[in-house]
Image (tube, rainbow, N blue to C red):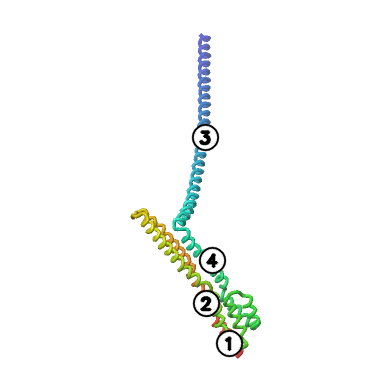
Amino acid sequence: MKKIVSSLVVAGMLTFGFSSFSHAQEDGDVEEVMTEEVVEDDDASESLTEVALEEQEDVVAVADEVAEEESSTADVGFTSRLKQKFIEGDPFWMGIVLIALIIGLALCIERIVYLNLSSINTKKFILDVESALSSGGVDAAKELCRNTRGPIASIYYQGLDRAEEGIEAVEKSVVNYGGVQMGLLEKGVSWISLFIALAPMLGFMGTVIGMIQAFEKIVEDGQVSPITVAGGIQVALLTTVFGLISAIILQIFYNYIVAKVDGIVNEMENSSITLVDMMLKHKVAGK
């Protein structure tokens, strides 16, 4: 009886141990399978991320190429359209208007550069001249004016150079030399106004001649064709448009130049009065 019980106990233990081992082995297999699935999922997600990044880079590259093509197309389109309109408006008359615009712009640029070089810090210059008169007298002030650019310095030099002749001679010299400097400032401005008036006039002339040619073509055809009339009028009006655009551009520069000249002239007049008062104050002008 004891042997039978012992055998049953041993058999039960063996059965329990075998089942535990089987469950453990199955759990291990499941864990391995799950681990493999997780690894595979990670690999799949990494591959999907790489594919998405590559697709995004491709989209960005394509967008950049499209933007570059559009910009280049816009530039080329504007240039080609401008050339086309220039040719349609009769290159002869359009060329004349273009020459007027170029010459007018050249004169404007020359005047702007000259006027900017003629402008100085007037207040600082007057203080320096007064300091030179106080410390070194007329010769020091003349040396300072000689080394300073601009019409105001030139007027001061001429006034100081007549200091020994009396205050009346100084005033007369300042006024006369101020007129000379004003003429230098306004040099070439009348030519700019000429090209401002000339550009639209040339454009109108091209339009009139274009209209005459359009009517001559109607007479030759013997009938009034809307296409012929509209095309001729369109081509004729292009010269007027180009002439008006040229005149507007030159007018803007002209107004800036005139305003700059007026500002410098006002500074010259105020500085001339200050010079006379300064010479009377320091008693450097003879009687």
Q: Amino acid at mark 3?
A: Ser
Label 4 and label 3: CA atoms lie apart by 65 Å
Whether residue 11 is situated above or below residue 107 in the rendered picture:
above
Q: Is disc 2 placed on a helix, strand or loop?
A: helix
Q: Is disc 4 placed on a helix, strand or loop?
A: helix
- Please report the residue visible at 57 percent of the width from the left and 71 percent of the height from the top: 117
Q: Name the residue tied to disc 2.
A: 265
Q: Of marks 2 and 4, which one's residue comes earlier in the chain?
A: 4
Label 1 and label 4: CA atoms lie apart by 40 Å
Q: Residues within 10 Å of mark 1 (few under 14, many from 20)?
A: some
Label 1 and label 2: CA atoms lie apart by 21 Å
Q: Amino acid at mark 4?
A: Ala
* 2 vs 4, front mark: 4
Q: Name the residue tied to disc 1.
A: 169
Q: Amino acid at mark 1?
A: Ala
Tag count:
4
Label 1 and label 3: CA atoms lie apart by 96 Å
Instruction: Tell me, yes or no, if residue 279 can be seen here.
Output: yes
232 and 133: which one is in front?
232
Q: Name the residue tied to disc 3.
A: 47
Q: Of marks 1 and 3, which one's residue comes earlier in the chain?
A: 3
Q: Of marks 1 and 4, which one's residue comes earlier in the chain?
A: 4
Q: Is disc 1 placed on a helix, strand or loop?
A: helix
Q: Name the residue tied to disc 4.
A: 106
- Please report the residue visible at 49 percent of the width from the left and 54 percent of the height from the top: 79
